[in-house]
Image: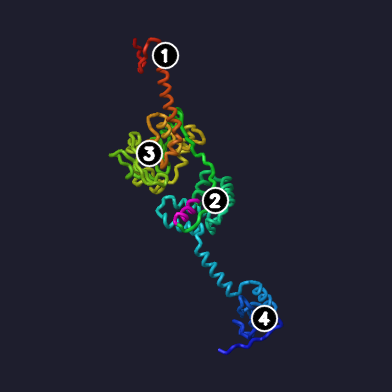
């Protein structure tokens, strides 16, 4: 291929060759610049007359930039290529989350976590690496969410971010955050209890209601302490009348567990009407129930219970409170009955057991006082005087 003729311009180091415009076939000038870099002579294409609106003056400006250290077109392309390669190798929060999901596909809480990630974390932190996160941004997210969300919800969101980063660190694919995430203070140790009078009123209101599903569901919550979701998931095959156990499905996202089927619960379930559905308390079309709020709130209102009493979860607390205050059930047993993963959650009822033990201790003190006050009389533990 013959060497094309170079045409000088009025600007030093700038020349052009004749060419043809792409598409129009119109004759145009193709400008080049010459300069030395690292002791070597460089010839670089500056641009085309029509396609790039290139002129000798613009080409001269590009030449000055190159001589002052600016990157050549080739160097720019190589830099862009290297940047893309580096970008592809980055373990951003978004990429970590995708990997986390692929390895935790059997996690029962993954769907909930995915909703939290998409709603609160992806836009703010998705394209950043953990080491590039700024504490101020995380603090601002916490403060913003606390204005409209419960502390527990905000804690779940921030804990998810921390879990994603820790996943990457433990796998050795990224560095951690350069700071510790400040978690909001959560006070979710609310225990809802009912007085004897309130419980009596509730049981009467339950018996008066025409919705048998709601009535029996509330009674079973009181008899067993089961959670709302566990009651909705309960199937007839989970009820073992012979051995006296109930199989609890997915208690708080954990493995299935069994709890004893006491006599009141057994009697209730044996008399409960079967509709042909596999669920004990079926929803629409015989499928799994998703709500029963209207009916249980109607019963709650009829019983004149406090406004902040939650009809189903409150009965779970009532069940636990009755056992704890009896003084006959230790905290470990109560933890197992409530299917708590950690004893921390069960400790909310410890003060009730302590109160029962205190009453027992006071009884011992009263007996001793009787001995002291009786002088020479000796009082036995059944209150019988002896000489």
Q: Which mark is residue 336?
A: 3
Left of 376 or right of it: where is 118? Answer: right
Left of 17 or right of it: where is 277? Answer: left
- Rounded to the nearest angstrom, the CA distance separating label 4 from label 3 is 86 Å
Q: Which mark is residue 13?
A: 4
Viewer-proximal residue among 3 and 12: 12
Please provide percent x and percent y for residue 14: 67, 81
Q: For numbered disc 4, what is the local secondary structure?
A: loop
- Rounded to the nearest angstrom, the CA distance separating label 3 from label 2 is 37 Å
| Dot in front, 4 or 3 | 4
Local packing at callout 3 (Cα closer than 10 Å; few below 14, some 14-19, many 20+) is some
Whichever of labels 4 and 3 marks the residue nearer the N terminus, that label is: 4
Which stretch is magenta? 162-171
- Rounded to the nearest angstrom, the CA distance separating label 1 from label 2 is 64 Å
Whichever of labels 4 and 2 marks the residue nearer the N terminus, that label is: 4
The residue singled out by tag 1 in the image is: 372
Where 151 falls versus 205 (above or below)? Answer: below
Q: For numbered disc 2, what is the local secondary structure?
A: loop
The residue singled out by tag 2 in the image is: 179
């Amino acid at each position: 291929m013959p060497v094309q003729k170079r045409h000088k311009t009025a600007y030093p180091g700038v020349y052009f060759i004749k060419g043809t415009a792409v598409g129009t076939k119109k004759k145009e000038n193709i400008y080049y610049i010459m300069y030395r870099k690292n002791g070597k002579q460089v010839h670089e294409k500056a641009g085309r007359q029509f396609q790039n609106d290139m002129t000798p003056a613009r080409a001269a400006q590009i030449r000055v930039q190159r001589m002052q250290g600016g990157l050549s077109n080739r160097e720019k392309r190589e830099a862009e290529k290297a940047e893309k390669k580096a970008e592809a190798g980055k373990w951003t929060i978004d990429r970590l989350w995708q990997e986390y999901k692929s390895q935790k596909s059997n996690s029962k809480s993954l769907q909930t976590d995915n909703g939290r990630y998409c709603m609160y974390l992806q836009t703010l932190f998705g394209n950043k690496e953990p080491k590039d996160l700024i504490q101020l941004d995380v603090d601002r997210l916490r403060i913003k969410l606390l204005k409209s969300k419960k502390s527990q919800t905000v804690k779940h969101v921030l804990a998810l971010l921390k879990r994603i980063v820790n996943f990457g660190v433990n796998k050795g694919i990224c560095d951690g955050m350069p700071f510790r995430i400040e978690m909001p203070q959560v006070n979710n140790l609310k225990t809802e209890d009912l007085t004897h009078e309130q419980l009596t009123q509730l049981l009467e209101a339950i018996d008066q209601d025409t919705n048998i599903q709601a009535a029996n569901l509330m009674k079973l919550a009181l008899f067993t302490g089961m959670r709302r979701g566990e009651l909705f998931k309960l199937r007839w095959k989970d009820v073992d009348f012979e051995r006296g156990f109930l199989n609890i499905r997915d208690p708080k996202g954990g493995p299935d567990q069994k709890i004893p089927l006491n006599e009141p619960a057994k009697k209730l379930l044996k008399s409960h009407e079967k509709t042909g559905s596999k669920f004990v308390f079926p929803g629409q079309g015989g499928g799994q129930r998703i709500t029963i709020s209207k009916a249980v709130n109607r019963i709650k209102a009829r019983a004149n219970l406090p406004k902040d009493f939650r009809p189903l979860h409150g009965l779970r607390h009532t069940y636990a409170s009755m056992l704890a205050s009896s003084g006959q059930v230790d905290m470990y047993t109560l933890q197992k009955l409530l299917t708590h993963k950690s004893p921390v959650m069960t400790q909310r009822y410890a003060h009730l057991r302590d109160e029962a033990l205190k009453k027992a201790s006071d009884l011992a003190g009263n007996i001793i006082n009787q001995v002291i006050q009786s002088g020479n009389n000796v009082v036995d533990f059944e209150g019988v005087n002896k000489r």
